[in-house]
Image (spheres, rainbow, N blue to C red):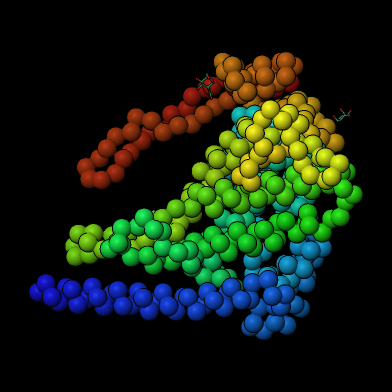
Amino acid sequence: RRSREKRTMAGTRLLLVAALLCSCTQLLAEANSWWVPAPPPQRPEMYIIGAQPVCSQLPGLSPGQRKLCQLYQEHMVYIGEGAKNAIKECQYQFRQRRWNCSTVDNTSVFGRVMKIGSREAAFTYAVSAAGVVNAISRACREGELSTCGCSRTARPKDLPRDWLWGGCGDNVEYGYRFAKEFVDAREREKNYAKGSEDQARTLMNLQNNEAGRRAVYKLADVACKCHGVSGSCSLKTCWLQLADFRKVGDLLKEKYDSAAAMRISRKGKLELVNNRFNSPTQEDLVYIDPSPDYCLRNETTGSLGTQGRLCNKTSEGMDGCELMCCGRGYDQFKSIQVERCHCKFHWCCFVKCKKCTEIVDQYVCK
Ligand SMILES: *[C@@H]1O[C@H](CO)[C@@H](O)[C@H](O)[C@H]1NC(C)=O
Ligand SMILES: *[C@@H]1O[C@H](CO)[C@@H](O)[C@H](O)[C@H]1NC(C)=O
Ligand SMILES: *[C@@H]1O[C@H](CO)[C@@H](O)[C@H](O)[C@H]1NC(C)=O
Ligand SMILES: *[C@@H]1O[C@H](CO)[C@@H](O)[C@H](O)[C@H]1NC(C)=O
């Protein structure tokens, strides 16, 4: 009996190896087609002609991005998804702050093009770039894109010997490269005078885009699944898996808190304003302009102001009425909250609850 088990296991392994080889050839093709500026192989005319209306209708793309849109049209829906997910994460991370990740100008796919190079702009760029890496890497794994497939990251050296490396992993390498090309295109097509404010902003955006991409790359980790006779876990298959995007948001929020203030040198390089601090690495966020206080609406700074924002009367933090309302005071109103309550477990197996309504005091900034 044991020998038969061995044989089936060897069989599984063979199949896996075959599958690996297959995906390798596919991935080699992927490596070659990458950045060769030619349309994808199947029915190129469909991409070129069919793409144009879509790509010219998408708001907020730069000329270079429009071209990439035409070449990689099937990527666009994932770019949009990634950007949307990024904005949602941004709103979560900043839900209790005066700046809540909304801006006056939300017309582009990336929304939130911010005119001043603040810390908040830095976060916005980083999280958007991260969102694109995330969405494209996953789309590759799910087989949604013709130019990429499963991750081909090498087997980690510390993976126990008898564990298989071969599940279909999120293709973070492709996601990273694609996002670099696509997201940075907007910055690379500009050609500002060395040492100018505009050049400073371009370098700032590039640095923050990179930090965002690296956050996704860094947090991706090995995931494994057990196989083997009746759940014995004698065999494990492992692959590369993206972290939950919340973790990326958390990491970038930390980077936001420790972001470095920079200025442009005459030679056209970003340098620290205060060189007592350590130079930022490629994983760090940088900014060139001080943040406004976000108290009042101002089109120039992209601030919506905090009028009408809910605040917490008893909190002494940023979400407290004192800080949130910038000392303008607040209005109180009653609101009805419906909650599940008096829940009972019924045999077997469901939970039945009643609906309770409660009148709570809420506060909004004047
Ligand atoms: C921009 O914001 C306005 C108001 O918040 C909203 O109605 C509109 O749909 C938004 N546009 C985009 C492109 O998200
Ligand atoms: C908006 O902010 C800019 C830059 O801080 C400032 O110069 C301008 O006066 C502000 N505008 C209004 C209407 O408050
Ligand atoms: C953010 O704040 C603005 C202005 O105060 C408000 O209109 C908007 O609903 C808030 N957005 C979120 C997601 O809380
Ligand atoms: C308001 O802030 C207090 C103190 O930080 C906290 O205990 C409470 O849960 C907050 N209330 C709401 C509704 O968030």
Depicted 209 relative to depicted 74: above or below: above
Can residue 304 be seen from the camera position used here?
Answer: no
**Residue 273: image x %, image y %?**
76, 31
**Residue 326: image x %, image y %?**
72, 19
Taking 211 as reference, is 66 left or right? Answer: right
Taking 152 as reference, is 184 left or right? Answer: right
**Residue 288: image x %, image y %?**
77, 36
Nearest to the observer: residue 24 or residue 94: 24
Depicted 324 relative to depicted 104: above or below: above
Can residue 22 be seen from the camera position used here?
Answer: yes
Quadrant of residue 190 in the image? bottom right
Nearest to the observer: residue 148 or residue 108: 148
Name the residue located 62 percent from the left edge and 32 percent from the top edge.
257
Taking 78 as reference, is 170 left or right? Answer: left
Count of labels shown? 0
Nearest to the observer: residue 18 or residue 355: 18
Tell which residue pokes out farthest to the left in this image.
1
Depicted 265 relative to depicted 292: above or below: below
> Quadrant location of ligand 2?
top right
Quarter of the picture holding the N terminus: bottom left
Nearest to the observer: residue 162 or residue 253: 162
Taking 252 as reference, is 276 left or right? Answer: right
Quadrant of residue 69 in the image? bottom right
Name the residue located 33 percent from the left edge and 77 percent from the top edge.
15
Tell which residue pokes out farthest to the right in this image.
193
Name the residue located 33 percent from the left edge and 65 percent from the top edge.
164
